[in-house]
């Protein structure tokens, strides 16, 4: 009986050990090479992910990756896949399907223990509703020793700029920013991202031209611009001026 118990105990320990080893293999399983140049390529792909390639890049993250952005944290490859599927679903609240991300600058460092950290400044662009948007951000990607898949990614961007052209979100974002400017006594400054002379916020009183810019990402869109009928773009920031399809606006 004792011998049988000992054998059972040994077998149990071997099973637990095997399961533990298998779990570890699942966590670190990655088909990506771990040399420095390959890691840089992997990281660059992850920070420029878009609607056309996010499904093919899922395996570039480690099984237990931690992915953070300004609002959400995704833990594990499955949650990251779910997150990007939702963001690129075509919902007006997600990422534009034509979103493009360009790396403006990048630095990386490999350490003696075999780990590596990659950092990049990026620029996003795309269409939200009928409006074009452009914003800057930064991403950090980390690799554990000897691994070619990213174990950590942090994307920094101004979520308010991403939400600026989403009708359900803009009033809240705009109200918070106007309050922020007023509280800190910055109302006499000109907040004008596209440098066309028109303020982005109603609380910004220091701009040289009167009027509120409805799209502060594009220089050619402002209250002084000439409206082009029928192109679906509100160039002069005046909804009373027809800009949609001529067939629906009474144009002949």
Image (cartoon, rainbow, N blue to C red):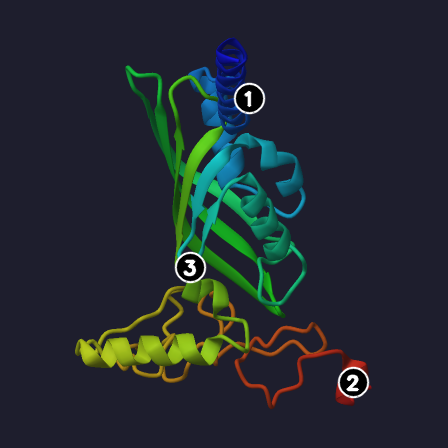
Residue at figure coordinates x 63%, y 70% from the top left: 130
Q: Between residues 103 and 26, which one lies in front from this camera angle?
A: 26
Q: Front-most of 210 and 233?
A: 233
Judge depth for marks 3 and 2 and give the one in front: 3
Residue 189 placement (x, y as % from top left)? 23, 74
Q: Is residue 158 above or below residue 53?
A: below
Q: Residue at point 44% right, 33% down?
A: 151
Where does label 1 land, which residue?
Answer: 32
Whichever of labels 1 and 3 marks the residue nearer the N terminus, that label is 1
Can you tell which quarter of the image residue 93 is in? bottom right
Q: Residues within 10 Å of mark 2 (few under 14, many from 20)?
A: few
Is the residue under label 3 in contact with that under label 1 (CB below 8 Å)? Answer: no
Please give the label number shown on residue 248. 2
Q: Residue at x 41, y 81 (%)?
A: 212
Residue closer to the observer: 134 or 88? 88
Q: Are marks 1 and 2 in contact (CB under 8 Å)?
A: no
Give the structural element (helix, strand or loop) at label 1: loop
**Callout 3: helix, strand or loop?**
loop
Q: Residues within 10 Å of mark 3 (few under 14, many from 20)?
A: few
Compare residues 130 and 158 and report the one nearer the observer. Answer: 158
Expressed as whole percent of the image width and height from the top left, the position of residue 20 reads: 49, 24
Marks 3/2 in contact by CB < 8 Å: the verdict is no
Residue depicted at 20% across the width and 80% down the height: 183
Position of residue 58 relative to residue 97, above or below, is above
Secondary structure beneath label 2: helix
> On residue 216, which mark appears?
none
Q: How far across and down, in percent of the image, does residue 36 sit?
A: 42, 18
Find the distance from the CA under tag 1 to the CA under tag 3: 29 Å
* Residue 74 % position (x, y): 48, 48
Counting every numbered tag in the picture gives 3
Which residue corresponds to mark 3? 71
In the rendered image, is residue 216 in sight?
yes
């Amino acid at each position: 009986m004792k011998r049988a118990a000992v054998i059972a105990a040994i077998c149990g320990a071997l099973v637990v050990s095997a399961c533990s080893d298998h779990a570890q293999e699942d966590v670190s399983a990655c088909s990506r090479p771990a040399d420095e140049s390959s890691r840089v390529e992997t990281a660059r792909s992850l920070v420029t992910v878009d609607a056309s390639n996010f499904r093919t890049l899922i395996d570039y993250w480690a099984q237990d990756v931690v992915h953070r952005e300004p609002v959400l944290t995704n833990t594990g490859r499955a949650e990251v896949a779910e997150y990007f599927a939702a963001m690129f679903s075509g919902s007006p609240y997600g990422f534009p399907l034509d979103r493009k991300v360009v790396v403006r600058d990048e630095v990386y460092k490999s350490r003696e223990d075999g780990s590596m950290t990659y950092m990049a400044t990026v620029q996003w662009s795309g269409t939200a509703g009928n409006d074009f948007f452009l914003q800057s951000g930064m991403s950090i990607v980390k690799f554990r020793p000897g691994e070619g898949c990213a174990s950590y990614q942090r994307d920094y961007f101004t979520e308010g700029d991403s939400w600026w052209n989403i009708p359900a979100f803009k009033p809240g974002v705009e109200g918070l920013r106007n309050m922020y400017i007023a509280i800190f006594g910055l109302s006499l400054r000109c907040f004008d991202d596209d440098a066309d002379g028109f303020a982005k916020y109603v609380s910004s009183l220091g701009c040289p031209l009167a009027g509120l810019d409805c799209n502060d990402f594009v220089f050619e869109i402002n209250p002084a611009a000439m409206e082009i009928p029928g192109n679906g773009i509100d160039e002069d920031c005046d909804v009373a001026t027809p800009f949609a399809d001529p067939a629906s606006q009474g144009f002949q």
